[in-house]
Amino acid sequence: MHIRLLAVGDRQPSWVDTAFADYTTRLPRPWQFRLETIAMADRRKSATAAHAKSAEADKLLAKLKPTEQVILLDETGRQFTSRELSRCVDDWQAVGADIAFIIGGPDGVSEEVFTRANLTWSLSSLTLPHGLARVLFAEQLYRAWSLTAGHPYHRD
């Protein structure tokens, strides 16, 4: 199983990069975890949010492999407890499918991206800044792995 995060927005504050790297470097090497950033579409006054979402969707969808399980991070998705997420990670590892997680742009994602997703996961019902969503995603993925591996990171 290989995991990647496709995230719209290529510039983040240094604290985001530092915290994200701290958690992702702890992930198991066989996952070959990697971050792939997608440049945000132009958001000048003449460009609509729908136009930006469509342009970003084209870039996101072009990067997805047909066999990948796609998990969209969106506030409208399903919320998991840490233990529930660890069971999902365990199931994904058992199947062995490659996984692509997606964090969309500031206006969200197009309907085409929602349609391509096998699962929509909500980190919170709050709207989160994209950098914070990246860090929270990385921490929760590490926490889920630590639970499946019996690592003492998680405490009930």
Image (cartoon, rainbow, N blue to C red):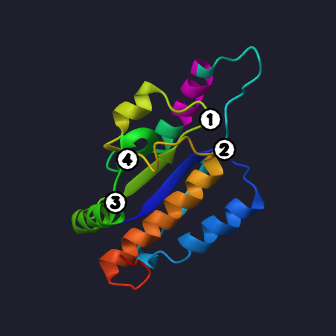
Residue at (62, 69) in percent of width and height: 21
Residue 113 % position (x, y): 43, 33
Mark 2 neighbour class, 10 Å CA radius: few under 14, some 14 to 19, many 20 or more: some
Q: What SS does tag 1 mark?
A: loop
Residue at (44, 77) in percent of width and height: 28
Frontmost residue, 64 versus 9: 9
Q: Is the magenta stretch mostly helix, strand or loop?
A: helix
- What kind of residue is marked 1? Pro
- What kind of residue is marked 3? Thr
Q: Are marks 2 and 3 in contact (CB under 8 Å)?
A: no
Quadrant where the N terminus is found in the figure = bottom left
Label 2 sits on residue:
9
Q: Are marks 4 and 1 in contact (CB under 8 Å)?
A: no
Q: Do the residues labelled 1 and 2 touch (CB within 8 Å)?
A: yes
Residue 15 % position (x, y): 73, 63
Q: Are marks 4 and 3 in contact (CB under 8 Å)?
A: no
Q: Earlier in the sequence, mark 2 or mark 3?
A: 2
Please check the rendered image and state whether residue 58 is part of the magenta-colored stretch, yes or no: yes
Label 3 sits on residue:
81
Q: What SS does tag 4 mark?
A: strand
Determine the image quadrant of residue 3: bottom left
* Residue 106 circle label: 1
Residue at (34, 55) in percent of width and height: 80
- What kind of residue is marked 2? Gly
Residue at (55, 40) in percent of width and height: 127
Label 4 sits on residue:
70
Q: In front of the other: label 4 or label 3?
A: 3
Quadrant where the C terminus is found in the figure = bottom left
Q: In front of the other: label 4 or label 1?
A: 1
Q: Is residue 146 toward the left or the right of residue 9 in the image? A: left
Q: What SS does tag 2 mark?
A: loop
